[in-house]
Amino acid sequence: MNLARLCVRLAILALLLLTTACAGLRHSEFASERSLQYVSVSQDETLLTRFAPVFLLENSDRSYNRIGTPAIRAASHGQPEAYVDSKNPSIYTQVQTFVGKSGEYSNLIYRVHFEKTPLPHLTWGQNVGLIVIITLNQDDQPLLLTTAHTCGCYLGIIPTSYLSETAYPANWSYRSQSIYGETLPGHIDLTRFVEAEKRFVLRIRSGTHRVKNVELQKDQQIRSHPSYSAAVLKPMAELRKLPFLGSEVSFFETEGPRKGYVRNSHKFLERLLMSWWALDWRIGEDKDFGPKEQTGTTFYTSLKPWARDDSDLWNFSNFLNYWGWKL
């Protein structure tokens, strides 16, 4: 087989994996109602807790499907090694403000991590994570719910009924949207939304940790579920100062070629099948989230190499413009 033919076959295989491998489930990974777990936080008057999403985890009897707490331990060579302790759920948060074409907005940012994505999924690797961003207007009304894995992949943007139709991308479907094999709502109706009674619930697929649905549920119903677990909200900055042998170590590499990437987060299948055409040797590896001048990485959400900066999720106003939203 000549080199050109091999490259074509690898490209076809990569595209098939992108659209099927991550969405597909082995038979044993279909969730039963007995293996579901709600993860939420207590309600109070702060915006971060009022709007904190609920995570509905499939097959939570498996440790890799549970939201955990990032931590550092000593590897065999004595150097710090990152892992995710699945016994206690933590949600890391921060607030970001930005100015758009129509005014000022606030982003409520929530970040969670899992111990791994197992084989045979394309995104196989350790310490994987998910980011959820709820965008509020100046009246603290939620306009958008944005989700992405902490590698920047599988971006989903869901508008609510508080967002003006003039801000939507052209030809937007209110009914649904397809994101690499998952179908998410194209719109969430909040006309009957009462923050004290209902919460955004993200259903997380077993194994891949893909967001497979977003809906509203009553808070009382969530807390009465037999497998409800209370998560702890923590400042995002704590990820950069995890305890280790009497000192503090960042969950992210702080120097060298992997600066800004999650420690021990390597995506070998994505590197093999995608790095050569996406022009990114570290494609799929989980990252810090912040200004690239500080983190060392660009949190891009488009695979187009020329769109890295324009699709950077941190620069939210530019990011929205790139994807056609007109806030």
Image (cartoon, rainbow, N blue to C red):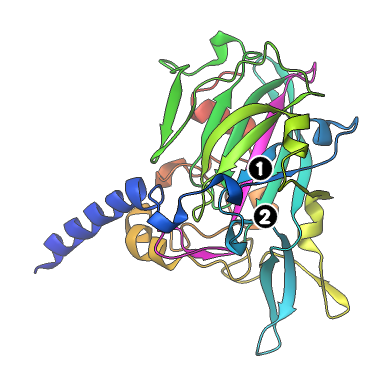
73 or 28, which lies in front? 28
Tell which of 322 and 95 is nearer to you.
Answer: 95
Total marks placed:
2
- Residues under labels 2 and 1: Cα distance? 9 Å
Q: What number is the disc on residue 67?
A: 2
Residue 247 horizontal/vertical position (percent): 86, 75
Based on the displayed image, in which of its 4 quarters is residue 47 positioned?
top right
Task: Locate residue 182, reporting x and y percent.
Answer: 43, 38
Q: Is residue 30 visible?
A: yes
- List the residue tagged with mark 1: 55
Q: Is residue 267 depicted above or below 160 in this figure?
A: below
Q: In front here: 130 or 24?
A: 24
User: In the rendered image, which quarter contains the C terminus?
Assistant: top right
**Span highlighted in magenta in the image:** 115-141
Residue type marked 1 = Phe
Element under label 2?
Answer: loop
Q: Quadrant of residue 143?
A: top right
Residue 9 to residue 47: above or below: below
**Badge 2, how many Cα within 10 Å: few under 14, some, many 20+?**
many
Q: Secondary structure at mark 1?
A: strand
- Do residues under tags 2 and 1 come within 8 Å of each other at their CB atoms? yes
x%, y% of residue 326? Answer: 57, 18
Callout 2, which amino acid?
Ile
In percent of the image, x 68 and y 28: which residue is there?
217
